Image (spheres, helix red, strand yellow):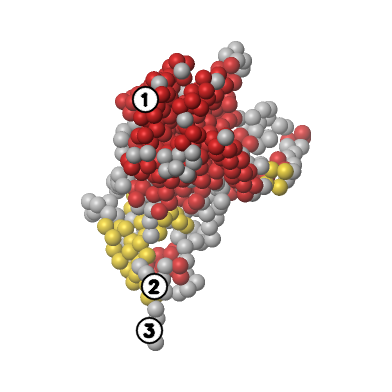
Amino acid sequence: MAKSNKPIVWSLFAGGGMLSAFVTPVLIFITGLAVPLGLMSLDSLSYDRMLVLAQNPIAKIVLFAVIFLPLWHAAHRLLTTLHDLGLPKGRIAMTLCYGAAALGSIAAAVVLLRI
Amino acid sequence: MTEPTLQVEILRYRPETDQDPAFQTYTVPYRDDWVVLDALNHIKDNIDRTLSYRWSCHMAVCGSCGMMINGEPKLSCHAFLRDYYPNKIRVEPLNNFPIERDLVTVTDDFMEKLESVKPYVIPKQERAVDEGPHLQTPAQLNTFKQYTMCINCLLCYAACPQYGLTPDFVGPAALALAHRYNLDTRDAGREQRQEIAASNEGVWDCTFVGECSQVCPKSVDPAAAIQQTKIASTIDWYKALLNPWGKR
Amino acid sequence: MSRKPYLRKMPKSWWLAQRRYTSYMAREMSCVFIGAYSVLIVLGLYRLSQGRAEYGAFLDALQSPPSLVFHAAALVFALIHTVSWFSLAPKAMPLQIGEKKLSGGPVVLAHYAVWVVVSAGVLLVARI
């Protein structure tokens, strides 16, 4: 049997799964619920504060990791889930899922570098 | 006083006459120390001699009486009527395997996969008899002992949706046994087994549903074995990438 | 006698057939929200890069009812992901001291402990 290259995507899946298990709930809570509902001050996400954060080189790397890894985690899991739901395994589904993750990662990198 | 009874609905398939399998209901006496296998034996001995099913030991050792009982893969010698009484019990052949006849399934696919992972000790060098036994400490034994408990009952294959969706998937029991020998200190055959275990049809078809471990009557935990194999195979892959000239 | 093995087809709705399969599917579906949230962060950063007014519009959009509903659902699924991820972690890391195999409990607890610390840390930084 052919040697598998699955370890590339699987390691991204596992790394992204681990990272998002730890940080995604609290991030969703802050940005999507606590601040918009006024449980936390709007200053937390203010323009000046976020700009300083996004211009810091170390924060750029952290932000990129927090976007990139969960994105690949999600893409890989979506691919297997589509198969679970009855879609045949094939190049089309694979290209769409991994392609979307690649595009998202590039967009994240470009945006972060330009801030 | 009338004896309490219980209805058992069995999926029948007689290849010489039936186009499709169909359920047939039997009424059996209810005893609180009976298991589903006892009910089947009662039917075979007293009601319908044509009913076919596999069994041997009646004590969860031989692994031949696995069936779907109310939709869950179970050993029929391990499923007590009292856990279902007074409700009807539905008995079907194991999911994901072709039906040979009634509750008997075709298991050739698993047998081939089991053989393909070389589930036996492959020593680095053959040991002569006068060299004595190959010693192993209890601590070394315990790293893999749980995986030796597999009785090839195939409940894990019946529980695994990935095997149902992708019949080429090597599957839980075979991969757990590959892992068992890889962990054995007397063994040097991991590289040979990885040909199968680390292929696309090996551990990579698993999505960690975890049902294999849930239904295992021997607590083998194939899901853990597969997960550990994924991690080890991923480390191998990156090692090979960083050191393309090193030995594979 | 000739053989005629019968293969039953697996129904497409197999994941509804049993409760444990359904919770597996809920766990897998968390990826839709986790992926969408990553895209949302990229969008937020893009609006940030455009300027104060554009970023302000993004913050306003976060307060809209559809956004709140999405984030509430996303939080539920993110928590399903976290809990299921932690509960499966011991399978990947078997622990043995000497002859004794350790149970997975401490590994799971350690994950929760780290999670609490990380979440508290992020909350603290966000408030400062």
Q: Mark 1 sits on what residue?
A: C54
Can residue B189 be seen in this snapshot? yes
Which mark is in front, 2 or 3? 2
Compared with residue A54, is residue C16 higher up or lower down, i.e. above or below? below
Badges 2 and 1, same chain: no
Q: Within the image, what quadrant is residue B247 found in?
A: top right
Q: Give A49 or B124, whichever is nearer the viewer.
A: A49
Lateral position of residue C20 relative to residue A62, left or right: left
Q: Residue B86 carries which label?
A: 2
Q: Residue B2 carries which label?
A: 3
Of label 2 and label 3, which has the lower sequence position?
Answer: 3
**Identity of the residue drawn at 56% across and 48% down:** B220
- Is disc 2 placed on a helix, strand or loop? loop
Work out which quarter of the rendered image holds the N terminus of chain B and state it.
bottom left
Badges 2 and 3, same chain: yes
Mark 3: few/some/many CA within 10 Å (<14, 14-19, 20+) = few
